[in-house]
Amino acid sequence: MLNIILFGKPGSGKGTQAEFIKEKYKLVHISTGDLFRQNIKNKTDLGKLAQKFINNGDLVPDNVTIGMLKAEVDSNYNAKGFLFDGFPRTVDQAISLDNYLEKVKLKIDLTISIDVKDDILIERILKRGLTSERKDDQDKIKIKNRFDEYNSKTAFLEEYYKNQNKFKIIDGFGNIDEVTERLYIEIDKLIK
Ligand code: ADP
């Protein structure tokens, strides 16, 4: 089993890189952002609940997110490993994930943080907002709010995983292939 968390600010490229990583290492990719967007599209109760938080750039409450995540892990019990993208985003989520994985005799192997400067991130997000339908990508105030949420709730996870010796930062600047290569180097170290 190989269980990896892709970590980074909004727009850092987690989703893009996850596509390559999941293929190469045959991992089940769990993106909480994608799961929420699917639920919104299908107008499920969960989607209706999450929608207003997401559109404003707020985090969805922990109890909702954690429940959704566990259900997703459960329904993939035969996976070779998981690639978590966009989860955990709060220390409570991280603690829940650790407790849950322990119960099913699994653990996180590594959290890899994709590091990109804020001004580049904002540029990337606004550009994505031109072609995607994501309302949270189209408004500078909502984008700023996502960064505030990151700084006030998510940034603490760096310390959480550093304390467990499971935190690695890679440079997220450069073209997509270069960043993918940097990620592969770190993941390959885990399987040698
Ligand atoms: P990005 O990382 O580009 O901001 P995501 O697609 O990962 O985008 O997430 C979009 C939105 O979904 C977040 O701004 C948040 O509202 C919600 N969301 C995703 N993951 C979580 C989570 N783990 N906890 C709470 N809210 C989440």
Image (cartoon, rainbow, N blue to C red):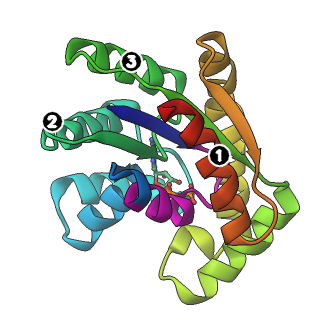
Which tag, 2 or 1, sits closer to the chain's start? 2
Vertical order, 74 against 179 (above or below):
above
Residue visible at 12% across and 43% down in the picture: 75
Q: Where is residue 9 in the image (x, y as percent from the top left)?
A: 67, 49
**Residue 12 in view:** no
Vertical order, 1 against 76 (above or below):
above
Vertical order, 28 against 125 (above or below):
above
Give the image quarter of residue 17: bottom right
List the residue tagged with mark 2: 74
Magenta span: 7-23
The answer to whether 176 appears left or right of 29 in the picture is right
**The disc label shown at residue 98, or none:** 3
Q: Position of residue 150 (x, y in %)?
A: 66, 41
The quarter of the image holding the N terminus is: top left
Which tag, 3 or 2, sits closer to the chain's start? 2
Could you tell me how far apart the alpha carbons at marks 2 and 1 are, in whole angstroms?
29 Å
**The disc label shown at residue 185, or none:** 1
Vertical order, 124 against 89 (above or below):
below
Compare residues 136 and 100 and report the one nearer the observer: 100
Residue visible at 34% across and 41% down in the picture: 82
